[in-house]
């Protein structure tokens, strides 16, 4: 171990410096949000939390946050449940077209977001559906599904069917065996899938921006605010989101890192 | 037997419903791209005009070529930086790996809009890059980075680095340490070991990272939108502006279909290229 510590020091220093470069923008963002004036400068001139307080006056942001959270939680739940059903079929049964089904379930991943958004826009507009909630709910289920399928399927593949069969031979019904034996074992996979779906939905911008007819999502509201106004309130909102992510990763880092690329 | 088929069908039904929605949306967009301009009912009329208009004009091609060019060199820079970070992580202890990993996952979990906004504050006229360089007397006047292609390139690279690091790190970790020790014991210099053994064996990870990042950068909207400010639009900005500012849905649909085909070609050619590069490893 001590040999390893002195080896490759130069390379490790370069890597560390590059990682730090990635952190700088985030630090600047939080610094700017603490400015006491309207100027967006770093280091901040005079510290204050007035832009955070100002968030309460921005009903647009509050409204957008509510819709974004609703979409993220809803699409994560739907995608995890749908992936669970599909994964049971894919791992427990042999059937014709197995690989085709898997490819189709993952297919939204390979289509660029701007093309997905365009497809939803022209189709829904053609049908006369200009309801942002319904449109975004459909869109977010589509874009989160591949992520949950990958994670849940890989969790299911790790649980041998023999355990369920053993439970059944001891008299459990197939349904009871599934819920008491398999579900507890894949629970971490389900949670990880839900987290990735939540994040994917929460941060989606490029496809969602085509569908914000009567309501808007948080990323779209932030983008519009950055483009059209010169007011650090958007930095305060962005800093809050960053802090929430940092807090979450500080607690669940090991768990997230472990599941990050399972099945990927 | 009959029961089993029914059960499989029932289990696949919810997923099939969601994918059916997706495919229907894509199919109707493709159909709509063949409609004459001004038609609002999908399925009415048939013409190649939208494609002809796009493909016969150098002005429209320039969006495709511009996007291909900028994402080509940005992917290369991202690969070099991403590889350096992954290699440093691979050569560090578990604690450092966990901390570096946490920083990268925080990046991935923070919305692109927010990360791009943060980069905007960094490279602006009064951003800290200009302030530092002015303060150190390296430059006399603030550099124009924001609203130029350079600014967009900086943003694209910074935003896509996490996508590059994780696949490369995964393939580095797959290399057995014995291989390196064997080549060292046969007298290879550290430099030679790195290029002929370590780097070659990590190529599949590089390939995966390059494909993901190239596709992501080629069709990115937020970075050129915020950091280019209309002066460095890429193909995704073009499609959005045609649809949402000019309301030319049929033409925008054709541009989207062309973009989809282009990204398909890019992925297939990259896969073929890396297949050739790594063939001798697997043989």
Image (cartoon, grey):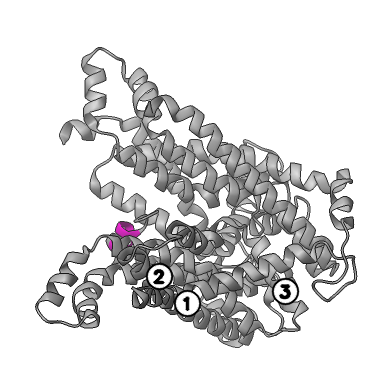
Looking at the image, is A4 positioned above or below residue A25? above
Task: Identify the image quadrant of the N terminus of chain B.
Answer: bottom left
The residue at the point 47 percent across, 77 percent down is B14
Kindly report the secondary structure that dominates the magenta region of the rendered protein: helix
| Boundaries of the magenta span | A255-259
User: Where residue B14 is drawn, which disc sits there?
Assistant: 1
Whether residues under marks 2 and 1 lie with C-beta atoms below 8 angstroms apart, the answer is: yes
Quarter of the figure with residue B86: top left
Q: Chain of mark 1?
A: B
Which residue is more in the foreground, B255 or B6? B6
Residue A216 shows in this picture: yes
Task: Quote the CA–CA distance across marks 3 and 1.
Answer: 21 Å
Q: Residue at x 47, y 81 (%)?
A: A74
Q: Which residue is the site of mark 3?
A: A123
Where's residue A12, x and y in %?
34, 36
In the picture of the structure, the residue carrying the numbered disc 2 is A86
Residue B166 magenta: no
Residue nearer the viewer, B113 or B138: B113
Task: Give the crowd class for mark 3: few <14, some 14-19, many >=20 residues within 10 Å.
Answer: many
Q: The residue tagged with tag 1: helix, strand or loop?
A: helix
Q: Residues within 10 Å of mark 1 (few under 14, many from 20)?
A: some
């Amino acid at each position: 171990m001590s040999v390893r510590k002195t080896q490759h020091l130069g390379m490790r220093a370069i890597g560390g410096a590059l990682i730090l470069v990635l952190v700088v923008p985030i630090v600047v963002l939080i610094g700017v949000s603490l400015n006491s004036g309207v100027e967006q400068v770093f280091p901040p001139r005079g510290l204050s939390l007035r832009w955070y307080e100002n968030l309460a006056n921005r009903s647009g942001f509050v409204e957008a946050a509510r819709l974004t959270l609703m979409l993220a939680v809803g699409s994560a739940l739907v995608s995890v449940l749908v992936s669970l059903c599909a994964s049971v079929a894919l791992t427990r049964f042999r059937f014709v077209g197995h690989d085709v089904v898997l490819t189709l379930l993952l297919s939204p991943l390979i289509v660029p977001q701007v093309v997905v958004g365009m497809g939803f826009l022209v189709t829904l507009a053609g049908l006369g559906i200009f309801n942002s909630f319904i449109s975004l709910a459909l869109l977010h289920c589509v874009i989160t599904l591949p992520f949950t399928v990958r994670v849940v399927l890989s969790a299911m593949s790790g649980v041998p069917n023999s355990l369920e069969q053993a439970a059944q031979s001891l008299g459990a019904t197939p349904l009871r065996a599934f819920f008491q034996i398999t579900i507890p074992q894949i629970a971490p996979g389900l949670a990880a899938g839900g987290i990735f779906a939540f994040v994917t939905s929460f941060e989606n911008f490029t496809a969602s921006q085509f569908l914000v007819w009567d309501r808007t999502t948080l990323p779209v509201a932030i983008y519009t605010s950055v483009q059209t106004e010169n007011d650090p309130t958007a930095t305060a909102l962005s800093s809050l989101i960053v802090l929430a992510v940092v807090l979450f990763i500080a607690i669940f880092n090991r768990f997230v890192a472990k599941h990050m690329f399972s099945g990927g | 037997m009959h029961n089993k088929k029914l059960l499989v069908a029932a289990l696949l039904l919810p997923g099939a419903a969601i994918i059916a929605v997706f495919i229907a949306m894509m199919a109707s967009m493709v159909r709509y791209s063949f409609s004459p301009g001004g038609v609002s009912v999908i399925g009415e009329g048939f013409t190649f005009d939208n494609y002809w208009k796009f493909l016969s004009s150098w002005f429209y091609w320039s969006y495709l070529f511009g996007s291909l060019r900028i994402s080509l060199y940005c992917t290369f820079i991202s690969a070099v930086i991403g590889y350096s970070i992954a290699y440093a992580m691979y050569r560090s202890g578990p604690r450092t790996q966990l901390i570096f990993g946490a920083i990268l996952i925080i990046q991935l979990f923070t919305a692109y809009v927010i990360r791009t906004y943060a980069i905007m504050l960094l490279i602006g006229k009064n951003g800290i890059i200009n302030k530092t360089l002015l303060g150190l007397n390296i430059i006399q006047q603030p550099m124009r980075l924001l609203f130029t292609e350079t600014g967009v390139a900086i943003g694209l690279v910074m935003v896509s680095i996490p996508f590059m690091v994780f696949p490369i790190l995964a393939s580095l970790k797959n290399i057995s340490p014995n291989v390196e020790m064997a080549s060292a014991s046969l007298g290879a210099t550290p430099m030679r070991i790195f290029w002929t053994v370590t780097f070659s064996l990590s190529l599949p990870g590089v390939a995966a990272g390059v494909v993901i990042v190239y596709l992501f950068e080629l069709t990115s909207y937020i970075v050129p939108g915020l950091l280019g400010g209309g002066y460095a639009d890429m193909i995704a900005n073009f499609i959005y502006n045609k649809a949402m500012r000019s309301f030319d849905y049929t033409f925008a649909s054709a541009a989207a279909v062309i973009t989809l085909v282009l990204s398909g070609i890019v992925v297939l050619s990259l896969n073929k290229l890396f297949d050739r590069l790594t063939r001798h490893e697997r043989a």
